[in-house]
Image (spheres, rainbow, N blue to C red):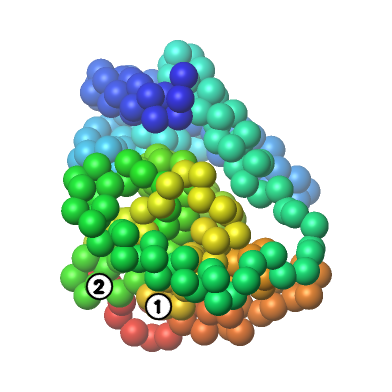
Amino acid sequence: MNGEYLTKLRDEMIAAWFSSLKVGDKVYNYSDDRPDKGMVRKLREGVIKEIHDNGRYNRFVIVDNLTTGRQNKWGDYALVMPPEIEAVSDKLTQLYAVNEADLLQKPERTEPTIDEKAAQADYERLLESAKELLKNDDVQQGRCSGIYGAFNKKTGECIYIGKSRSSISTRWREHARFWKKLRPIHRQPLLTQYLHFFSDQIEWKVLLPVESDINNDLLEYCERRLFEKHHPIANSIIPNGTFYGRSVMEAEGDSVSVSEWNPDMVTVKIHKGEFNGFSDGKAHFR
């Protein structure tokens, strides 16, 4: 089973299960307590008082928490689900863990692996080819490999630039799956926060569709060029292709500060779990 099929199956099962819940039902969730600064998972029990089903990314219940005596809001993703749903979710987690492990394997630092002039020429050729490819509906919907971006629907401001050597649409769903739990995808915690607070104002676009067998160094070079063109504000991890087609992480090896390679980055201020403005004081979303 591939990730796309499992994701669709899991989402359909969760939707059907959540629709079956009724006021008065007992539900459970896990909370992370920190006695003596050690993480301890604790199962809590609650009785449903209200049910709110506002679509895939906004389903939750209000419960009387029988464990703490308080009233809580529990999102659908935080509830303990039936074993058959958990089994599908576990398969997805294992599948993405394997894929991410492959992506995150760091190659040994080498001398420059690409010819700058040749790479620039190839990049311009790919941009020209993309004009025709982007007229295809499947390509626009991310059913291709390549480089993509997240943009503010109203202003067009670039939020994030990323790439995928497999299906871009699958990567978009992967981003959505992680932001629901405020878990960073590919070590991008800032992007996760943007998606958590402003998902309805963000749209994904394919910027450069390419063949899946494209040379990886060239793909990384193209990503860097598009990064420099669009100035994304939520990329907090240095993109591949910045130095000789290889990744250089902040505080690893020859350290490079975020402010040096992405002066446009804008962090999100959070107070008591709620959005509390941006680090530059500007209103990027309304």
Secondary structure under tag 2 reads: loop
Residue carrying label 2: 156
Front-most of residues 82 and 92: 92
Q: Looking at the image, which residue sits at the far top?
A: 84
Residue 22 % position (x, y): 25, 21
247 or 144: nearer the eye?
144
Between the C-alphas of marks 1 and 2, the distance is 13 Å
Q: How many marks?
A: 2
Whether residue 45 is visible to the viewer of this picture, yes or no, is: no
Q: On the picture, is 59 further left or further right than 36?
A: left
User: What is the crowding at mark 1: few (fewer than 14 residues within 10 Å), some, or many (at least 20)?
Assistant: few
Res. 31 in view: yes
Residue 158 figure quarter: bottom left
Kindly identify the residue that appears in the image at 48 percent across and 14 percent down. Answer: 83
Callout 2: 10 Å neighbours few (<14), some, many (20+)?
Answer: few
Identified at 18% across, 70% down, the residue is 154
Q: Quadrant of residue 216?
A: bottom right
For badge 2, the amino acid type reads: Gly
The answer to which image quadrant residue 116 occupies is bottom right
What is the three-letter code of the residue carrying label 1? Lys
Residue linked to disc 1: 229
Q: Are marks 1 and 2 in contact (CB under 8 Å)?
A: no
